[in-house]
Amino acid sequence: VLADPGQQVEQMASLTSYWGGFGMCLL
């Protein structure tokens, strides 16, 4: 099942910001 593009992009952006913050904490 494909989610609508807007939702997929938003989900990717939140994941990226989440992992980005996680990486910064490790540094």
Image (cartoon, rainbow, N blue to C red):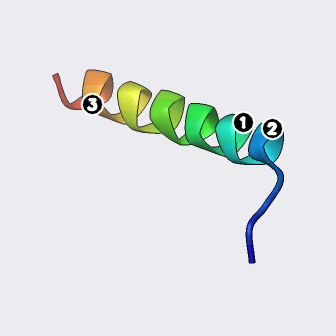
Residue at 76% in and 44% down: 5
- Residue at the disc numbered 2: 6
- Residue 19: name its quadrant: top left
Density class for disc 3 (Cα within 10 Å; few <14, some 14-19, many ≥20) is few
Mark 3 against mark 1, which lies toward the viewer?
1
Q: Amino acid at mark 3?
A: Gly
Residue at 79% in and 61% down: 3
SS of the residue at dot 3? helix
Q: Quadrant of the N terminus?
A: bottom right
- Residue 26: name its quadrant: top left
Density class for disc 1 (Cα within 10 Å; few <14, some 14-19, many ≥20) is few
SS of the residue at dot 2? helix
- Residue at the disc numbered 3: 23
- Residue at the disc numbered 1: 10
Density class for disc 2 (Cα within 10 Å; few <14, some 14-19, many ≥20) is few
Residue at 83% in and 52% down: 4
Could you tell whether 9 is left or right of 20 in the image?
Answer: right
- Residue 21: name its quadrant: top left
In space, the residues marked 3 and 2 are separated at their CA atoms by 26 Å
In space, the residues marked 3 and 1 are separated at their CA atoms by 20 Å
